[in-house]
Amino acid sequence: NVVPMPPTSPPSADAPHTSVLREETLAALEPRVRAAAVRGVLCLFAALLALAPYVRAVAGGDSGAAAGVRLALDARALASVLWGGAVLFPFAALALVRSGSASVWARSLAAALAVLVLPVLVVHAGGDNQSKLLNLGFALAAAPAAIGIARIAHTRARRAAFVLFALAAWLPGVAAMGWAYAHQSDGSADAPSRPPAALLVAVLRDVPAAGVVVDATQDTTRGAAPALAGATGRALLWSGGFMARKWGYGSAALQQRAAAAAALATGRWPADTTGAWLEALGREVWVLAPDDSAHASDPRWHVVARADGVALARFAAPVAP
């Protein structure tokens, strides 16, 4: 038995016209698509150029960015992007997509967000500095996210639903942060290392604003910032390797500062080029160190305050013969 073939409809008279119209439409869209792609690449390149000095500063400093940056997949970074951006990034993406490819601000923001967020997943910078890029990404995504939320929550019911959603998303984090701030003390693991309170007052009173301080009482064994600079506004000659690596200074400069601080903390003026460099600063040098009677024999060591076994002294530079 032969199965009869279904009758075929005759070709429409409009088919050639439709095909030509489709080709003309594609030909007209092709330059626009190409131009949009070029604009997107230019926006991405401009964002990279704008961020390059900052990334170099926090990653490698004078020693070069390659010294502080390496490719590495980071599970913590991925978790931070997913959890921290769970609310911001979807709503920001909604606002950017709805703005269309013709929107200059949408293209620029999308390129900047890509440059800030994507490297966090595959680039590891010394001192966990890639987190700074993610924080900037969160701040940049906040405005378009607010626009995306406003476009969705345009009715009373949707606004109420979003309020409940926001409370569920943010309230636990705010509560945990508040509890941590309320219970933080000088004994906390990341509490700033600080000298006795009476000596902080003495630093404010006696050390000139242009002076430089060596705090030999600082605990440099943990990742905590020193309290003296923030509490007194006086510059520290050396704040420990953890904080120094945060800003990517050159290794030679860091070693010089560490050597100078170590010598001054023991009552000795640094020798050779380190001492010459310290003299060239032209700034008064003050030292917070354990109150050791051995320092009293040095005529350049002038103690101005004592408290809790710690002394604040001005260390005069050696006089040239």
Image (tube, grey):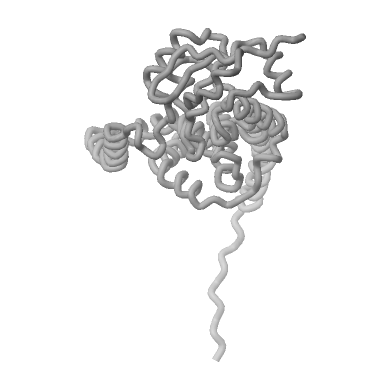
Is residue 127 or residue 188 the one in the foreground?
188
Q: Is residue 111 visible?
A: no
Residue in front for this viewpoint, 309 or 276: 309
In which quadrant of the rendered view does residue 105 lie? top right
Against 277, residue 169 (above or below) is: below
Residue at 47%, 12% (x, y): give it: 304
Q: Residue furthest bottom?
A: 1
**How many numbered circles does the render carry?**
0
Residue drawn at (61%, 50%), measured in percent from left and top? 72
Q: Where's residue 239, x and y in %?
A: 54, 28
Q: Position of residue 245 (x, y in %)?
A: 59, 34
Question: Where residue 152 sits: x, y (%)?
Answer: 34, 36
**The image quarter in which residue 261 lies:** top right
Nearer to the camera, 157 or 229: 229
Image quadrant holding the C terminus, namely: top right
Instruction: Using residue 113 as the reference point, say whether residue 148 is left or right of it.
Output: left
Residue 296: quadrant of the picture: top right
Quarter of the image for the N terminus: give it: bottom right
| Vertical arrangement, residue 304 with respect to residue 143, above or below | above
63 or 112: nearer the eye?
63
Q: Vertically, is 301 above or below 177?
A: above
Asked if residue 321 shows in the view, the reply is yes
